[in-house]
Image (cartoon, rainbow, N blue to C red):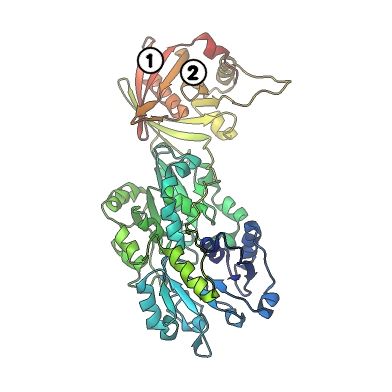
């Protein structure tokens, strides 16, 4: 069997199909790169990463194949010999692309690519919904006669991975925060092309302890820009904690983990809608979106994000709408795609399918851990013994109370101007020859060397800190985790340190011990301040 690919995105789609052949030693799979795509270099790299065996295009042309599987009708596929199957490489046909094929026709439904000498060259169009068959019949009736509704293997993989949601959120460090995912297609009308500053703008508005932000880019955007330039262009947002999902599998795990999605007109958001996630539109209009398509219908009713500051209101409005009916117009036969595809593909192969059941492979845990921010602009509200803390990137436009920075990870500019410096104890065992600071020694050094610093804190464990304040002196801080419904929830101790610093600023006269209540993001924790004990003072960092 031959898998013919033109881009990394098409390859990823086809890899979701291959479980239909699991356990069958009769099937040998080879891959070939179809020439002519602007994104073929990344497709070749993706093939190498997959560990697949490849054959050169000229060799693929010269051989007869028992089955040919592709996820794009473009390219010289008609010259390959053997039964040919075309899968969509997205959630239906929602876009038209300028300068490709026939003007204004949906990408994937253009007779220019579907016919050879007036006849369809594919033996099967494996589609996800009857509406797609109807639209294929409208634009290319001859090809529609060879169409079958089998469902969407990629969607079924997402649905089957829902039981892993907590595992994905744990890998991403989400905790109890809301994970908001931006999704962008590729091309001049994409969110990333038109609003490249939106990730940074949103991070500047969203409290770090309440929300986490992810970005899913179309594989073609990865290929066009390249990981190096993407990291450079997104550097400020990545430093503030943005998750940039890798284009294979990780994007799907991010959707499973997400609480809501902000999208342009790319069909990725339809997968999120099928999972029941609230959807906010950020498409500014243009010529690519096909009127009446499932994506167009969803965007017509979704709340729209005009400015980053509008996101909280847009999310509240989106939560009032059930997005699954929009996805139902794009995905039929949910949970059945691999079984139905196996029947169709083995029919073309002339073989009896294996007797073992077929099931999607669960998505792996995300491997891209977000960067932990090293500096925050902190807004604090003190009311008696209760403190509310919100933390933002240092360049936020929000009104804030103080700057807090991690030593030595924060850059010199932030470390020298921070009112709060903190350091986390290392868990690794010291080297045979070592020199380590005690918590007491390091906090004293910080107040000596950083004249702007008012509070230095050594974070010893998630529940235990030593704080040295210029006026209040040395204090031991104990943070009680939240225990609810059989779970233990912990706030970031660095946020608690900022709360303690703000309370000490507002309360110059007090006597330990004292118990404070700290609100940080969705969590409320109790914090006890006492005179520093010997074990905290001597704790080795």
Contact (Cβ within 8 Å) of mark 1 with mark 2: no
Q: Is residue 473 left or right of residue 231?
A: left
Are there few (<14), some (14-19), or many (20+) residues within 10 Å of tag 2? many
- Placement of 163 over or under 391, stated as above or below: below
- Placement of 319 over or under 474, stated as above or below: below
Count the marks.
2
Q: Position of residue 358 (x, y in %)?
A: 48, 59
Q: Position of residue 473 (x, y in %)?
A: 48, 12
- 351 and 512: which is toward the camera: 351
Question: In which quarter of the view is residue 410 placed?
Answer: top right
Residue 73 visible somewhere in the drawing: no
Question: In which quarter of the view is residue 392 placed?
Answer: top left
Residue shown at 59% from the left, 26% from the top: 427
- Placement of 184 over or under 456, stated as above or below: below
Task: Label 1, secondary structure: give it.
Answer: loop
Q: Is residue 315 left or right of residue 231?
A: left
Q: Which mark is residue 258?
A: none
């Amino acid at each position: 069997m031959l898998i013919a690919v033109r881009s990394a995105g098409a390859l990823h789609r086809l890899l979701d199909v291959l479980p239909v052949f699991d356990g069958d030693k009769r099937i040998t799979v080879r891959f070939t790169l179809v020439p002519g795509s602007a994104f073929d270099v990344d497709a070749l790299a993706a093939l190498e990463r997959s560990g697949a065996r490849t054959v050169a295009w000229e060799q693929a042309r010269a051989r007869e194949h028992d089955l040919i599987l592709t996820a794009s009708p473009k390219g010289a596929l008609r010259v390959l010999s053997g039964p040919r199957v075309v899968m969509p490489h997205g959630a239906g046909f929602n876009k038209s692309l300028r300068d490709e094929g026939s003007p204004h026709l949906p990408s994937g439904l253009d007779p220019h690519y579907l016919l050879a000498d007036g006849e369809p060259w594919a033996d099967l169009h494996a589609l996800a919904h009857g509406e797609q068959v109807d639209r294929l019949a409208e634009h290319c009736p001859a090809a529609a006669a060879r169409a079958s509704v089998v469902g969407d293997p990629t969607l079924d993989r997402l649905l089957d991975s829902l039981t892993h949601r907590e595992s994905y959120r744990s890998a991403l460090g989400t905790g109890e925060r809301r994970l908001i995912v931006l999704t962008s297609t590729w091309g001049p009308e994409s969110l990333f092309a038109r609003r490249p500053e939106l990730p940074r703008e949103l991070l500047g508005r969203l409290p770090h302890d309440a929300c986490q932000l992810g970005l899913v880019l179309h594989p073609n955007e990865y290929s066009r820009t390249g990981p190096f330039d993407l990291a450079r262009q997104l550097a400020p947002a990545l430093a503030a904690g943005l998750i940039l999902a890798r284009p294979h599998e990780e994007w799907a795990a991010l959707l499973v983990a997400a609480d809501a999605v902000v999208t342009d007109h790319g069909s990725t958001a339809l997968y999120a809608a099928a999972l029941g996630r609230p959807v906010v539109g950020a498409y500014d209009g243009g010529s690519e979106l096909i009127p009446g398509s499932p994506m167009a219908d969803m965007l017509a009713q979704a709340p729209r994000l005009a400015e980053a500051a509008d996101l909280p209101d847009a999310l509240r409005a989106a939560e009032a709408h059930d997005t699954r009916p929009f996805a139902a117009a794009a995905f039929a036969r949910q949970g059945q795609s691999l079984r139905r595809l196996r029947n169709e593909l083995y029919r073309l192969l002339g073989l009896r399918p294996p007797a073992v059941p077929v099931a999607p492979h669960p998505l792996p845990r995300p491997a891209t851990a977000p960067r932990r921010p090293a500096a925050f602009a902190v807004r604090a509200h003190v009311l008696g013994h209760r403190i509310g803390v919100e933390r933002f990137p240092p360049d936020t436009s929000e009104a804030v109370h103080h700057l807090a920075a991690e030593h030595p990870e924060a850059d010199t500019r932030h470390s020298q101007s921070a009112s709060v410096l903190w350091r986390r104890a290392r868990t690794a065992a010291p080297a045979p020859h070592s020199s380590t600071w005690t918590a007491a020694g390091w906090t004293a050094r910080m107040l000596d060397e950083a004249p702007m610093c008012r509070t230095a804190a050594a974070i010893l464990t998630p529940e235990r800190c030593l704080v040295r304040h210029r006026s209040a002196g040395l204090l031991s801080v104990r943070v009680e985790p939240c225990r609810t419904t059989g779970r233990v929830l912990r706030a970031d101790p660095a946020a608690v340190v900022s709360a303690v610093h703000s309370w000490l600023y507002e309360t110059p006269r007090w006597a330990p011990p004292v118990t404070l209540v700290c609100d940080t993001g969705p969590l409320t924790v109790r914090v006890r301040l006492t005179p520093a004990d010997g074990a905290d003072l001597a704790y080795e960092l």
